[in-house]
Amino acid sequence: PTAAAAPAPEAPELSELRGLVEEVLWVVLLQRRSCPAARGPSVGAGGEELEERLGNLLIGSVGAALRPVARRLLGPGTRLAKQCRSEFPRLAAHLGFRESEDTAPAAGAFWSAAEVAAHVAEVRACRDRILGSEITKILTQLER
């Protein structure tokens, strides 16, 4: 069975939540890639410290909002979960993405409509905070 053979159609609210979680994870991965230390070994030890600090800031910024929902919405074998494990293992571990090729998410995405709405609001606020943060502005300038 594949992810397309899910037991029941997904509610629109759950699809919205999944989309927001994916968006936040891509933003975090792009920010991580923008860090000078992630660009190559020529940056030196200072770059490693910068990368470590950025990692801590990113996990601190998104961890609380994503941790209760990410692994219940994204299977460990999905492309995004694999990217997280490959590029940002600390975040993947924090979110509970295990090593597996299974594209089905972890069991337990059984929330009430009110819980889904609360998760949507929390992840949306997290996305807005991270996109509007100084870190995003600085890393965007480094790319130029």
Image (spheres, rainbow, N blue to C red):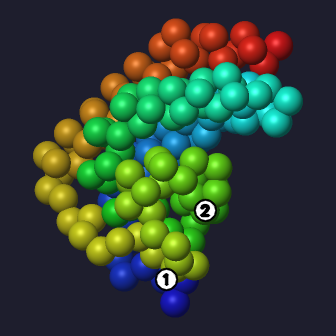
Residue found at x 82% / y 36%: 40
Few, some or many residues within 10 Å of mark 2 (<14, 14–19, 20+): many
Q: Which mark is residue 67?
A: none
Q: Please state which of residues 43 and 81 is positioned toward the viewer in this rendering.
A: 43
Give percent across and percent down for residue 71.
38, 61
Q: Amino acid at mark 1?
A: Ala
Residue found at x 56% / y 72%: 77
Q: Is residue 13 left or right of residue 79?
A: left
Give percent across and percent down for residue 142.
75, 14
> Is label 1 in a helix, a strand or a loop?
helix
Give percent across and percent down for residue 103.
52, 74
Rendered position, 95 above or below 129: below
Which quarter of the figure is the C terminus placed in? top right
Rendered position, 14 above or below 125: below
Q: Is residue 95 left or right of residue 137?
A: left
Residue found at x 24% / y 70%: 108
Q: CA distance from mark 1 to mark 2?
A: 21 Å
Q: Residue furthest front?
A: 45
Residue 8 visible (yes or no): yes
Rendered position, 24 above or below 108: above
Residue found at x 65% / y 32%: 48
Give the residue number, with chain letter if any, for mark 2. Answer: 82
- Marks 2 and 1: in contact by CB < 8 Å? no
Few, some or many residues within 10 Å of mark 1 (<14, 14–19, 20+): few
- Is label 1 or label 2 in front? 2
Quarter of the image where one finds residue 129: top left
Chain-order first, disc 1 or disc 2: 1
Q: Residue furthest right?
A: 42
Q: Which mark is residue 5?
A: 1
Q: Amino acid at mark 2?
A: Lys
Give percent across and percent down for residue 45.
69, 28
